[in-house]
Amino acid sequence: MSDTMTEPATGTAGRQDRDHAGGLATQGLAVGYRTRSPRRRRANRPVLSGLDLEARAGELTVLLGPNGAGKSTLLRTLCGLLPPLDGRIRIGGTDLAHQPPATLARRLAVVLTDRVDAGLLSVRELAGLGRHPHTGFTGRLTAADHAAVEWSLKAVCAGHLADRPAAELSDGERQRVLTARALAQEPEVVLLDEPTAFLDVPSRVALTVLLRDLARDKGLTVVVSTHDLELALRVADAVWLVDRESGVHAGAPEDLIHNGAVAAAFDADHLAFDPASGTFGLHRTARAHVAVDAPANVLPLLERALAREGLALAAPAEPTADRKVSWGGPGRLTLTGPDGQVVRVHGFHELTRAVRTW
Amino acid sequence: MTLTSVAVPDAPRAARPGRRRLAVVLALAVGTFVLFVLTLATGSHPVPVADVVRILFGATADDPRWTVIVEEVRLPRALTATAVGAALAVAGVQMQTLFRNALADPFSLGLSSGASIGVAAVVVGTGGVAGSFTGNLAGLGRVGVVIAASLGAAAVLALVLLLSRWVKSAVTLLVIGVMIGSAATAVVGVMLVYARPERAQQFVMWGLGSFSATTWPDLQVMLPVIGAGLLAALLTAKRLNALLLGEDYARTMGLNVRRSRNLALVGTSLLAGAATAFCGPVAFLGLAVPHLTRVALGTSDHRALVPASMLAGAFLALACGLLSQPPGTDSVLPLSAITSLFGAPVVIAFLIRSRRGVQGVAS
């Protein structure tokens, strides 16, 4: 479907080659708030500005950044809930500012952070609310509308929930159904503001992977803001990363890990990003080194347990370490302390308690 | 992921909600008609039901006095109860969706009190209340009272809507509504000092609420206004549905939220204003009926909820009207006393049952 999009209706500004068909793109976008001060009326307070971002159709784009960096402001502006302070937002080459709300609603749908009170609606009726921009004056659903609702529920694996009352859903199910409501609008672009915020880990993974698959299979442009950094870096096709200086970096997750943007945005006193594993670790300088004699499959676990107590593994070629831990079979560990005392412990918990005094 | 196949056996069940809604609407329609006829038949001079039906369809009754009683006294009363019940119920539906607050209705948020100020202003100014004061009132006076009451209701509704921008808790908003109501009552009290004593006395009677004070000329004003308000509500059902998930979602679905809010504001004010102008402030009808109807229908879909609430409102108003005039006696109980007696328990039950109510309904 990506080749059938019409050419942009407005202007022929120089950078149209960047407007991917069906995708979402911003040019020189500034987002923020308009404040009215008593002296200077309508002062703009931009949170982020000069944004040239692009989310491609068929890809999952993840918006990352520390709290208060402006993720929600950017997303609400892209939704059309906040007016942009400057610049343009385009969907498939059409400027968003020139679209009446009802037309826009057929191209862009959202899942917001607010917890909705569905009242006495069934799951099918809740998803059916998404048909609003497609139905006529009375809001009656035609056969085609019903088909679109069923399709959207199946797409989020919620077909079996259709007749359940929406108020009785679990958090994970509710987010899937709200995503179905957005899909029922049959949009090209779906924006989701922290959809995984209230979910447990399995539901987070399931929803994020589902969104990526939706983008791939249905050719949708999906933009998600999230705090779930490690998962996002693993699943996302592209990342928009808002750093502490209100700059936005865009690229594949690996690009941003490689150029240090992720580490710069999130590293804190106790947290350090490890580019090799793509995960965060506790950042602490080791107070001592320990020689370890253990099989390779246990080694990472020993390293984690020791790191929690401020100890690092000594390099194998380094014989000077007087502290020693050796693995003598399942759960049996022999420890040699700095004073030469030998202790036998069972399990990691006893290990960490024993080495705490080293 | 393979669970989607389970949807197939569910398909027959999908047809059921529609049938249930139809059954509820039909039952309400029949019940309303029965109560309507009963209202015409009972009173200090009972009229046989067969004669009531005969009079309704234009035939002559056995006793010509019955025709006069039914046509001149009881038909206006029954029509008033039907129209006002429907009006308050639909106003309640609109307000509950507009505020996303289960406890909103014209009475609880002070609209009736605002309408009272409007009525009091007319009473003090020109000396007449529609309904209770049928004697020396020209058509313009009636229209004036309705306009004043609607403006008073609209002013309070606009104020509460403004406050609801900052107040997110439903219970807090309710307390604010009660406060606005007391303030309005105080204003009315001060105004009445400057009214002639017999006018003030009649105003107090009006304040107790009654369906039986309206005459045909009153109905000529009230029925078109309420009819327009009900029609507007039916036509905006789609907008109200979009607002079910909140204003942000509604906006992203292409709804012009400000226009929808203004439409609902005007419609609700007209309905509450007209109802209050002729029947006095009627408590709880607008609050309880939408809840009972939602539960009966099993849905919050306004395309079913608005028409069903009209019928349920008319049904309950007729029932309360019958109860306020116990058969075989000449005494008339205040209408608001009856509606409060069944309305207050509904609110209390709702607050106890709803976890969100316990937590202050922070939405």
Image: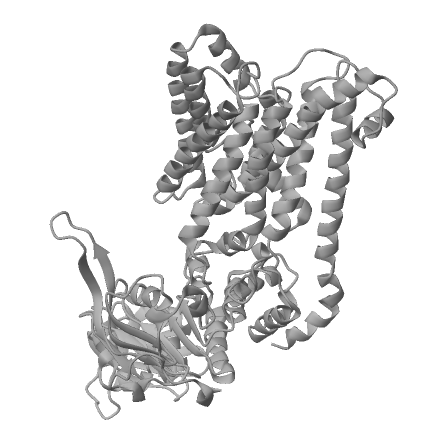
Residue A76 occupies quadrant: bottom left
Q: Position of residue B296 (x, y in %)?
A: 68, 45
Query: Can the viewer see residue B100?
Result: no
Q: Position of residue A64 (x, y in %)?
A: 31, 72
A35 to A154, vertically: above or below: above
Residue B70 occupies quadrant: top right
Query: Can the viewer see residue A14?
Result: yes
Residue that sits furthest to the bottom in the current view: A317
Residue that sits furthest to the left in the current view: A39
B102 to B116, vertically: above or below: below
Q: Quadrant of the C terminus of chain A?
A: bottom left
* Residue A301 placement, left or right of A148: left
* Residue B149 placement, left or right of B340: left
Q: Position of residue B355 (x, y in %)?
A: 52, 44
Residue that sits furthest to the top in the current view: B197
* Residue A234 placement, left or right of A322: right
B185 to B58, vertically: above or below: above
Q: How is the image coloured?
A: one colour
Q: Position of residue A250 (x, y in %)?
A: 28, 81
Task: Decide which of A117, A125 is in the foreground and name it.
Answer: A125
Which residue appears at 40% of the width and 83% of the height?
A298
B352 to A119, vertically: above or below: above
Task: Decide which of A3, A346 is in the foreground and name it.
Answer: A3
Task: Decide which of A205, B134 is in the foreground and name it.
Answer: B134
* Residue B172 placement, left or right of B357: left
